[in-house]
Image: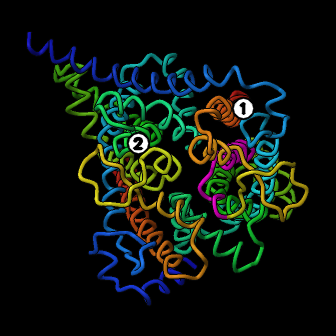
C-alpha cells in the first residue's frame, strides 16, 4: 500500500514538473501577447517614437536590430565557416586541434557581458571605432563565432567520407571538393546554425550596452558609424529607465511582443530547414 | 585585454582588500572596491535558481525520455527549445511586471525586486539547458540496464530511480554545471529584477546586485582609464574565471559519460 502510494508520488513528481515547465512558457507568452497585442500594429512597427517615447512606434529600434544582426552575420559567418572547414577538412587531429576545439567550446560559455567589456576595450577604444553600430555588430560577431563554428563543423561531419573520396578520385583538388561537393551538401545544416545564431544575436542586450546602443534616436540610421536603437535595449529602457514607466507599459509589452515574434520567426525558419533536410535523407 | 586592464586596477587597490572587504562603493571619496557583496549576491541568486531548476529540469527530462509517448515528446521538445529562444530582456521584463508584484504580494513587501525574483527568472533561463542535456544523458543509458533491472522484478519506478538516473549521473551533473554557467553569466534578467543594492545580502528577500549587473550599471557611467573603470574589468576577470571553471567541470563530466558508454 505504502509502496503504491510512493509510485503515485513519483508519477506526480515527473508529470508535475513537465506540466510546470509548460505552464511557465504559457505564462510568459500569454502575459506578453495578451497585454501587448492591442498596441502592436503596422503603425507601431513602422512609426517613429513621439512625445518623449510615450507614444508612437519603434521603427528606429526595429531598423537598428536588423542592421546590427546583418553586420553580426556578415562578420561571423565567413570567419566561422572558414574556421570550421579548416578544423574539419584540413587539420589533422592532434593535440593542437583538440586545444582549439576546447577553447571554442569555452568561448561559447563566456558570459555575454564580458564580450561587451571586451568589445568596449578593443573596438570602441583601441581601434577607435567609437560607440557605433559597427562596434556593436563586431562585438556580437565575436560572441556568435563559437556557435557558427560548432554548428558548421557538425554539418560538415555529417557528410559521408565516401563523397569526398569519390570527388578526389575524379581528379578534383581538395579545394574543389570542398567548394563544389562538401559545402553545397552541408548548406542546410550551416544555414540552420546561422539563423539560430542570428536569433540569439538579435535578442542580446548586454554586449551592446557599452558598444553603441542609444537611448533615443528619432531617425533611421544611415551610417555604420552612428549610434543606434535596438529592440532589446529599447525594452530594457522602457521598463526600467523611462521617466514615465507606468504610462509606457503598453509600449513595453508591445516591444517585448515584437522582439519575441522576431526571434520565434527566425527559430521557426531554422526548424523548417532542419525538418526538410532530415526528411530528404 | 581583460587581464591588462585589471592588472592596472591592482596597481591601485590591494588584492587583499578586493577579496576581503565588505563594501562596494566606488562613488565614495575613498573608493571602496570589494568584490565580496557582489560575489555573495551572485552566489545567492544562482543557488536559488539551481534549487528550483535542477529538480524541475531533471524530472522533466526523466518524464520526456521514460514516460512520455513519442508523439507528446515531439510536441514538447520544440516547446522547450522555444523557451530557450526567449531573449533575456523579455524574461527580465516579466520579472518587473509579473513575478515582482507577485512576490511583493505573497511576502508583504514594498516591491518584489529581490534575490528571490532573480532566482525564479534565472531558473527559467537555465531550465532548457538542463532539460536538454539531462534528457540526452538519460537516453544514453543503455536499454540493457533497464531490461536487466526489470528482469529482476523491479518495476518501472524502481528502475528509473535506482538504475537509470544513477547511471546517467555524470551527464546530469554536466547538465547542472552548464545550466549553472548560463545562470551565472546572465546579465539583463538580474539587472532588471533584483533591485541592485550593492550590500551584503542576508536572505532571499533582500535586494542584491550581481557581478554582471554591476558591470552593466557602472560601465556606462565611469570615465575611461580610472581606478573604477579598471575595477570593473577586474570583477569581469573573476566572473570569467568562475564560469570557465564551471564549464570545464561540465565538460569533464560530459567526457566521462562518453567514455563510460563507449
Q: Which mark is residue A265?
A: 1
Are dots 1 and 2 in contact, CB under 8 Å? no
Q: Between residues A244 and B188, which one lies in front from this camera angle? A: A244
Q: Which mark is residue B113?
A: 2
**Image location of residue A127, percent across then percent down:** 74, 78
Q: Between residues A103 and B51, which one lies in front from this camera angle? A: B51
Task: Using a 10 Å C-alpha cutoff, classify the residue at mark 1 as few (fewer than 14 neighbours), some (14 to 19) or many (20 or more).
Answer: few
Whether residue A130 is situated above or below residue B193 in the rendered picture: below
Q: Quadrant of the N terminus of chain A?
A: top left
User: Image point 70% across, 66% down: which residue?
Assistant: A86
Q: Which residues are magenta?
A: A189-210
Quarter of the image for residue A108 reads bottom right
Quarter of the image for residue A148 reads bottom right
Q: CA distance from mark 1 to mark 2?
A: 31 Å
Whether residue A158 is situated above or below residue B98 in the rendered picture: below
Under circle 1, the secondary element is: helix
Q: Which mark is residue B235?
A: none
Q: Nearer the viewer, mark 1 or mark 2?
A: 2
Task: Using a 10 Å C-alpha cutoff, classify the residue at mark 2 as few (fewer than 14 neighbours), some (14 to 19) or many (20 or more).
Answer: many
Residue B17 horizontal side relative to residue A266, left or right: left
Most common secondary structure along the magenta stretch: helix
Amino acid at each position: 500500500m505504502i509502496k503504491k502510494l510512493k509510485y503515485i508520488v513519483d508519477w506526480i513528481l515527473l508529470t508535475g514538473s513537465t506540466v510546470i515547465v509548460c505552464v511557465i512558457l504559457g505564462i510568459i507568452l500569454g502575459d506578453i501577447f495578451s497585454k501587448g497585442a492591442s498596441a502592436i500594429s503596422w503603425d507601431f512597427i513602422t512609426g517613429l517614437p513621439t512625445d518623449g517615447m510615450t507614444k508612437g512606434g519603434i521603427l528606429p529600434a526595429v531598423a537598428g536590430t536588423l542592421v546590427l544582426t546583418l553586420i553580426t552575420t556578415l562578420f561571423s559567418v565567413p570567419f566561422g565557416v572558414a574556421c570550421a572547414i579548416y578544423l574539419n577538412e584540413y587539420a589533422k587531429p592532434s593535440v593542437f586541434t583538440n586545444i582549439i576545439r576546447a577553447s571554442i567550446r569555452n568561448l561559447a560559455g563566456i558570459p555575454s557581458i564580458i564580450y561587451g567589456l571586451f568589445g568596449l576595450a578593443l573596438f570602441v577604444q583601441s581601434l577607435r571605432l567609437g560607440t557605433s553600430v559597427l562596434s556593436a555588430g563586431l562585438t556580437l560577431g565575436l560572441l556568435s563565432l563559437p556557435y557558427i563554428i560548432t554548428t558548421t563543423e557538425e554539418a560538415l561531419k555529417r557528410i559521408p567520407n565516401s563523397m569526398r573520396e569519390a570527388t578526389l578520385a575524379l581528379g578534383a583538388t581538395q579545394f574543389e571538393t570542398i567548394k563544389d561537393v562538401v559545402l553545397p551538401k552541408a548548406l542546410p545544416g550551416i544555414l540552420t546554425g546561422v539563423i539560430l545564431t542570428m536569433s540569439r544575436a538579435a535578442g542580446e542586450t548586454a554586449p551592446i550596452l557599452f558598444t553603441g546602443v542609444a537611448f533615443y534616436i528619432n531617425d533611421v540610421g544611415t551610417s555604420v558609424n552612428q549610434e543606434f536603437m535596438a529592440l532589446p535595449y529599447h525594452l530594457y529602457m522602457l521598463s526600467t529607465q523611462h521617466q514615465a514607466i507606468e504610462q509606457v507599459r503598453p509600449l513595453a509589452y508591445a516591444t517585448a511582443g515584437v522582439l519575441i515574434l522576431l526571434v520565434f520567426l527566425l527559430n521557426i525558419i531554422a526548424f523548417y530547414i532542419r525538418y526538410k533536410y532530415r526528411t530528404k535523407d | 585585454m581583460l587581464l591588462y586592464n585589471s592588472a592596472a586596477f591592482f596597481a591601485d587597490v590591494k588584492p587583499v582588500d578586493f577579496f576581503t572587504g565588505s563594501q562596494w562603493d566606488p562613488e565614495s571619496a575613498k573608493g571602496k572596491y570589494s568584490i565580496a557583496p557582489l560575489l555573495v549576491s551572485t552566489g545567492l541568486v544562482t543557488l536559488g535558481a539551481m534549487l528550483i531548476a535542477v529538480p524541475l529540469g531533471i524530472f522533466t527530462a526523466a518524464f520526456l525520455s521514460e514516460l512520455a509517448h513519442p508523439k507528446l515528446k515531439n510536441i514538447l521538445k520544440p516547446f522547450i527549445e522555444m523557451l530557450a529562444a526567449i531573449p533575456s530582456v523579455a524574461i527580465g521584463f516579466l520579472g518587473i511586471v509579473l513575478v515582482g508584484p507577485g512576490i511583493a504580494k505573497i511576502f508583504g513587501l514594498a516591491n518584489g525586486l529581490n534575490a528571490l525574483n532573480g532566482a525564479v527568472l534565472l531558473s527559467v533561463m537555465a531550465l532548457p539547458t538542463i532539460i536538454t542535456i539531462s534528457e540526452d544523458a538519460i537516453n544514453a543509458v543503455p536499454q540493457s540496464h533497464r531490461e536487466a533491472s526489470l528482469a529482476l522484478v523491479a518495476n518501472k519506478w524502481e528502475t528509473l530511480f535506482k538504475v537509470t538516473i544513477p547511471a546517467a549521473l555524470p551527464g546530469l551533473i554536466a547538465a547542472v554545471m552548464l545550466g549553472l554557467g548560463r545562470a551565472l553569466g546572465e546579465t539583463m534578467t538580474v539587472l532588471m529584477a533584483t533591485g541592485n543594492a550593492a550590500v551584503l545580502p542576508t536572505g532571499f528577500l533582500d535586494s542584491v546586485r550581481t557581478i554582471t549587473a554591476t558591470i552593466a550599471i557602472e560601465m556606462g557611467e565611469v570615465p575611461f582609464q580610472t581606478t573604477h573603470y579598471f575595477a570593473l574589468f577586474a570583477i569581469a576577470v573573476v566572473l570569467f574565471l568562475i564560469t570557465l571553471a564551471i564549464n570545464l567541470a561540465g565538460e569533464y563530466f560530459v567526457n566521462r559519460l562518453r567514455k563510460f558508454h563507449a
